[in-house]
Amino acid sequence: MVTIPVGLFTATEEKEVHFNQLHKGCGARVKYQKTCPVHEKVLTADEIERGYEVSKGNYVVITDEDLENLPIPSKHVIEVTAFVKVGEIDPLYFDRPYYIQPREMGKKPLALLMRALTDKGVAALGKVALRNRETLCLIRVTEDALILELLHWPDEIRKPAELDVKKSDVDEKQLKMAESLIDLLADEFKPDEYHDEFREALKMKIEEKAEGHQAQPAPEAEPAKVIDLMEALRASVEAAKDARRKSS
């Protein structure tokens, strides 16, 4: 029965380097056009409508008005249905995060919600309709912000049984060595220590080619020739120990 007016803002931004497709012959940018094969003409946006194929070659047309009038309670609102522990949700369900920003009338009740969620150590589970589809969502507190996480529906998660994964017997000595390696590399999550080396190298390559320089290819690492798993684990443990000594 409590309504809080809010707005949603994407919490992440895409940093991937994007390319355009060019014609090899002249370097002109390739254009994509939507055409009608019956009338053999290029279509404008207002000449295109949304259709769902119900049988081969037969479509049902769905208009913006149809979508707007769908009888779902989550339309234009985030409907909270339960409060859950975040740790109970498998990370496979998480899709995309949004920041929740209150409107002027919603600042006080949103602050109350954030405090209540923090004190109880829970998140709000609910549903929301965005981009012409309804989805599960989770509202959780992070630092000084409120995050809305879009979640996948259970039937969108592929089951491990669909994969051809065969279980193998585990050697106890190898297991202890592997656990020792995990203990040596155990650390807190420090995201600022990680960066996208591929993107940085790609940007450098682009800059070099733009300036007319031909960059030398980077040497590739020699593939490991160790076949024995125990020997590989032992070498990894020694390398981890050496790295820890150097960093301390």
Image: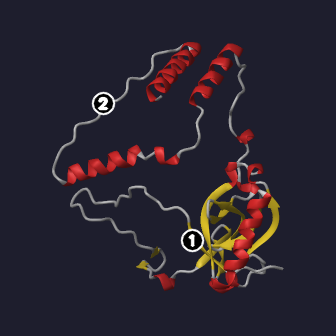
Residue in the picture at 69% in, 60% down = 151
Q: In which quadrant of the rendered view does residue 218 lie?
A: top left
Q: Residue 185 or 81: which is nearer the viewer?
A: 185
Does dot 2 land on a helix, a strand or a loop?
loop
Residue in the picture at 74% in, 54% down = 86
Can you tell which quarter of the image residue 65 is in?
bottom right
User: Is label 1 in a helix, a strand or a loop?
Assistant: strand
Please indicate whether residue 178 sits to the left or right of residue 136 in the image: left
| Distance from the alpha carbon under mark 1 to that under mark 2 | 42 Å
What's the coloring here?
secondary structure
Disc sitting over residue 71 in the figure:
none
> Can residue 32 be seen here?
yes
Closer to the camera, 23 or 99?
99
Q: Which mark is residue 219?
A: 2
Lateral position of residue 26 relative to residue 51, left or right? left
Indicate the quadrant containing the N terminus: top left, top right, bottom left or bottom right: bottom right
Q: Which residue is mark 1?
A: 9
Q: Count neighbours of disc 1 (C-alpha within 10 A) and say few if under 14, some if 14 to 19, many if 20 or more.
A: few
**Mark 2 crowd level (few <14, some 14–19, many ≥20, 10 Å Cα):** few
Name the residue at the front extreme. Answer: 248
Q: Which percent across, then down, holds residue 161?
A: 74, 39
The amino acid type of the residue labelled 1 equals Phe
Q: Earlier in the sequence, mark 1 or mark 2?
A: 1
Q: Could you tell me residue 221's position as x and y percent?
A: 37, 27
Does residue 168 sit above or below 62 in this rendering?
above
In this rendered view, identify the residue nearer to me: 46 or 176.
176
**Residue 87 placed where, x, y %?**
74, 49
Residue 75 shows up from this direction: no
Residue type, mark 2 in image:
Pro
- Residue that appears at 38% across and 58% down: 18
Q: Closer to the camera, 153 or 164? A: 153
